[in-house]
Image: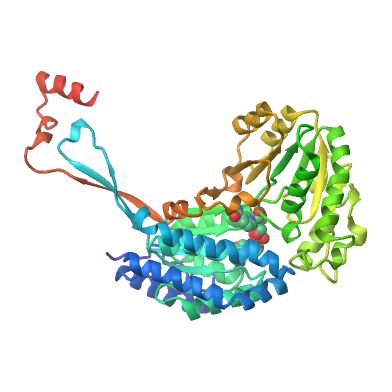
Amino acid sequence: MNTSGTPADAASTDPGIDPALTARIRPVVEQLRTSFDQGLTRPLEARLDQLAALRRGVERMRPEITAALAEDLGKSAAEAETTEIGPVLHEIDHVRRNLATWLRPRRVGLGLALTPGTAQLHREPLGLVLVIAPWNYPVNLSLSPLIGAIAGGNTAILKPSEVAPATSAVLEGLVAEHLDPAWVQVIEGAVPETTALLAERFDLIFYTGNGTVGRIVARAAAEHLTPTVLELGGKSPVYIDETVDPATAARRIVWGKFTNAGQTCVAPDYLMAPAEVIEDLVPHLRRAVHEMYGADPHRSRDYGRIVNARHHERLMGLFEGTTAVLGGPDSADADDLYIPPSLLQDVDWDSPVMQEEIFGPLLPLLPVRDSAEAVARIRAGEKPLTAYVFSEDENVQRQFVEETSSGSLAIGLTVAHLGAVTMPFGGVGESGHGAYHGEHSLRVFTHEKPVVRKPLRPDTLRMVYPPVGALKRTLLRRLLG
Ligand code: NAD
């Protein structure tokens, strides 16, 4: 099968694309297409081997990965392990254990009208896929999609984020050293490289990042009718009421919010609660920050840094018009890219901090009358990637399940649900489309092809061939209706 035709061969003539980049990228695309067309990635054993090679690479390069994450994001070794390396290894193991079962063709019934006959659903690879990754969990969010791409039997190009340059370089080395270059290649770079890549034709583009670039990706993909998975962000809300133990809830909220200094796509973005619950909760939130990061989080080995000066400046602007009841702009340090864990009150729904995804360690606390107002506030905004509810009241829980829409809904916990490889992870509406992890990755990285077999004898289809008289019509109505 030849999948290499590029109908809109515009890359080299588009004035926005550097011809030198096209000259570098196109041969890689062609090489990976050729190896796909030659069937390199089809055998189950070969896929399992590549996944095992990826696992070995991650294990062997653990020190380099950990050092790069510390350099790019001030990520502690412990956090690197729990949020980056560990989940990737776990995903590989889960996929390797189950891949044979997941790939087994699934029998489905055909109904009376097509009897005799049999039908199966086959998962076939898509071809060449492009994975564009962000900087906040640069290892996990590069390699987890790549695991799906390999498991699905596709060749792949990975474009890590230039905003985490040390990690990008390590990923490039890891893939070059441990994976088959005819199967996976890394192309490092920023906007020019991504733009040149997007002009090429892929069979799937898997993009994780912000919605503005998501739209650029979707537009470029449309040129080739390429499907996309868009893993985007949004303002993930928390609602908490008086029915829960505030100390435990506070620890879970603080951990989910301030891990990676708040630069997590599913981090609680803002918190809503009745005013008296907020009043009661604040000391518990303070205590939880103190327990996890000490009296001065600036000196904590467990507390990360903002990725760069641009984001530091952006976040400092979001303090405007708010009152910090913990942390705040005065103890931030631009030279060290440090912003303390901050709890904000006197926040208005029109405040700057409520106009965009925060993506940093600022937690606005907003009083609402009750759960109905919280639901109405969520519904008034874009659909978030996740919503969080802390309430023992089953009616309140049901209200959020039934009346709000979000990529996922977590009751009684934050962030940790992403570790469950059995659940699809993805957004809805403005927070993206398509979901992955475990078997769900296989679903997005393959085409489920119905394969139908019908014996030529007896020729039961004669029933539908014209001329269709009264008798045939009656019979057909019985069969099909
Ligand atoms: P980023 O700036 O690293 O961008 C992501 C990728 O897009 C990078 O590879 C980058 O090179 C590329 N890119 C940037 N500008 C481009 C352009 N003009 N044209 C083409 N490509 C371009 O990461 P980010 O977007 O700052 O990441 C943060 C956002 O990602 C947040 O909104 C966050 O919520 C979201 N996010 C979502 C998930 C998820 O799984 N749903 C995970 C992490 C982050």
Left or right: residue 202 compared with residue 284: left
How is the rendered protein coloured? Answer: rainbow
Q: Above or below — where is 332 with respect to 63?
A: above
**Above or below 383: residue 481:** above
Residue 431 position, x and y percent, is 61, 47
Q: Does 250 sit left or right of 398 as displayed?
A: right
Work out whether residue 54 or residue 457 is closer to the camera in this orientation and state it.
54
Residue found at x 53% / y 77% = 174
Q: Is residue 390 above or below residue 7?
A: above
Q: Residue at x 84, y 41 (%)?
A: 281
- In the drawing, does residue 319 fall left or right of residue 32? right
The quadrant where ligand 1 appears is: bottom right
| Quarter assignment of residue 65 | bottom right
Determine which quarter of the picture holds residue 182: bottom left
Q: Count the marks.
A: 0
Which residue does the image show at 67% across and 69% down from the upper left?
A: 163
| Residue 356 placement (x, y as % from top left) | 73, 49
The residue sitting at the right extreme is 330
Q: Position of residue 289 (x, y in %)?
A: 83, 54
Is residue 350 at least partly visible in the picture?
no
Q: Nearer the viewer, residue 382 or 89?
A: 89
Quadrant of the rendering where the C terminus is positioned: top left
**Where on the picture, by quarter, is residue 125?**
bottom left
Q: Nearer the viewer, residue 297 or 33?
A: 297
Tell which of 460 and 289 is nearer to you.
Answer: 289
* Residue 90 seen in the current view: yes
